[in-house]
Image (tube, rainbow, N blue to C red):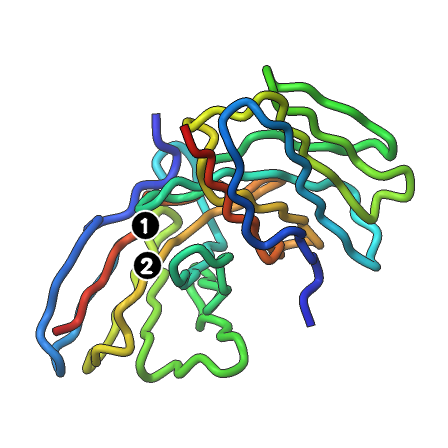
Amino acid sequence: GAVVSQHPSRVICKSGTSVKIECRSLDFQATTMFWYRQFPKQSLMLMATSNEGSKATYEQGVEKDKFLINHASLTLSTLTVTSAHPEDSSFYICSASGVVAFFGQGTRLTVV
Amino acid sequence: TQLLEQSPQFLSIQEGENLTVYCNSSSVFSSLQWYRQEPGEGPVLLVTVVTGGEVKKLKRLTFQFGDARKDSSLHITAAQPGDTGLYLCAANTGNQFYFGTGTSLTVIP
């Protein structure tokens, strides 16, 4: 079964609204989770590292006020895309890792 | 600058052909992973290689870790349409995973 569960798998929202994506570790406690963005047929681009109980660490070029990350518990991290615009449309994936990485199923976000 | 460079980036072959995907770096890694991702889904772990020179086989897939643990290759024998997907190598440098640039494979029936 899935080790990391991500929800929703697909979401369509209107421009200007906010969307929350959840990432849950099912069988283990994840002090650190990662959020990636992916464009078609391209590799994963790390957006930020989510740390339980503290602020997320964002990669260069990623707007922290636009992509809000909350990691309030050892099993849940959330990514909120605020004031979404069409250019935010993408595939977002979370992961939790130890020696290897386990990924959520991904979320296809479409902003219209 | 990418820590892990994969080649080729895109590959389209006929069913039954063989192919090799390369993952190269100037850094040394304690281990390296290969993942496969299908459209609309998250990547799925295929294999982890740990020892320099190690070769692992997974049915028609053969994975090799370079002697110096800086590079790896994935060889697919007699490719099938079900092998279509994005192949990613990855390395753990501590508490963060770095992913290769990716190889998008299409196997034509």
Query: Where in the figure is residue A63, as x and y percent of width and height?
Result: 40, 83
On screen, residue A100 above or below B46:
below
The part of the image, by quadrant, that contains residue A5 is: top left
Q: Position of residue B66 (x, y in %)?
A: 84, 39
- Look at the numbered disc 2 and give the secondary structure of its residue: strand
Left-right relation of A46 to A14: right
Q: Quadrant of residue B67?
A: top right
Residue type beneath disc 1: Gly
- Which quadrant would the N terminus of chain B be assigned to in this image? bottom right
Given contact means CB atoms under 8 Å apart, are the residues at marks 2 and 1 in contact?
yes
Q: Name the residue carrying label 2.
A: A91
- In this view of the protein, which residue sits in the foreground, A5 or B25? B25
Amino acid on which the number 2 mark rests in the picture: Phe
- Residue at 53% x, 37% y: name it: B13
Disc 2 sits on a residue from what chain? A
Residues at marks 2 and 1, CA–CA distance in whole angstroms: 7 Å
Which of marks 1 and 2 precedes in the sequence? 2
> With respect to residue B77, does B97 lie above or below?
below
In the picture provided, is A98 more to the left or to the right than A79? right
Q: Which mark is residue A106?
A: 1
Q: Where is residue B74 drawn, in percent x and y?
A: 67, 34
Direction right: furthest residue: B68
